[in-house]
Image (cartoon, rainbow, N blue to C red):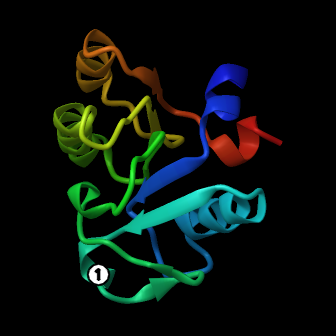
Amino acid sequence: MADIQHSTRTIALIGASHKPERPSHGVMKFLLSKGYTVYPVNPGLHGQELLGQPVYASLAECPAPVDMVDIFRNTDDAALVIDEAIALRHTLQIKTIWCQIGVTPVEAGERAKAAGLNFVMDRCPAIEWR
C-alpha cells in the first residue's frame, strides 16, 4: 500500500460526481488537497469542470499518463473499466487499478494482476492514505 501511495501522482477517478454528498466527490477533493493530479471521468459530466478540473468522458481521453485508475462504479461496470485500463496500460502508463469500498470485481482483478498491474479492491485511498 505504501509503495502505491508513494509512486502515485496522477489519478483517473472513474465515476466522478458533482454532488458533494457522493463519496467520489469527497475522495477527489481529498486527493486534490494532497497534491495529486486528478482527472475526473464521467460521460454525463463531460465538458464540465469538477473541483476546478475538466471532466473527461472516458479513461482513454485522459490527457497525460495516469499512475492509478480509481473506480467508483458498481462491480459489473468496474470490470469493464478494468478491461479498458488493461488495454490502455501501456498508452497511459497505468500502474495501479483501485476499486473503492464495495466494488469487488474479483475475476477482472485477476486479469489486471496477470497484466502486471497492482490491483486493490474494496478499499478507499482517502482512508488508507491518511
- Residue 15: where, in percent of width, then height? 38, 62
- Answer with the quarter of the image where residue 62 lies: bottom left
- Residue 100: where, in percent of width, then height? 50, 43
When the figure is inspected, residue 22 is found, relative to residue 59, above or below; the finding is below
Q: Name the residue beneath numbered marker 1.
A: 46
Give the total number of marks visible in the rendering.
1
When the figure is inspected, residue 108 is found, relative to residue 87, above or below; the finding is above
- Residue 32: where, in percent of width, then height? 68, 64
Q: What is the three-letter code of the residue carrying label 1? A: His
Q: Which quarter of the figure is the C terminus placed in? A: top right
- Residue 126: where, in percent of width, then height? 70, 48
Task: Looking at the picture, tell me which residue is in the foreground, 20 or 56.
Answer: 56
When the figure is inspected, residue 50 is found, relative to residue 1, above or below; the finding is below
Residue found farthest to the bottom: 48
Q: At x 54% / y 50%, what residue is drawn?
A: 10
In the image, 31: left or right of 75? right
- Answer with the quarter of the image where residue 44 lies: bottom left
Mark 1 Cα within 10 Å, few/some/many (few <14, many 20+)? some
Residue found farthest to the top: 114
Residue found farthest to the right: 130
- Answer with the quarter of the image where residue 61 lies: bottom left
When the figure is inspected, residue 64 is found, relative to residue 111, above or below; the finding is below
Label 1: which secondary element: loop
In the image, 103: left or right of 127? left
Q: Which quarter of the figure is the N terminus placed in? A: top right
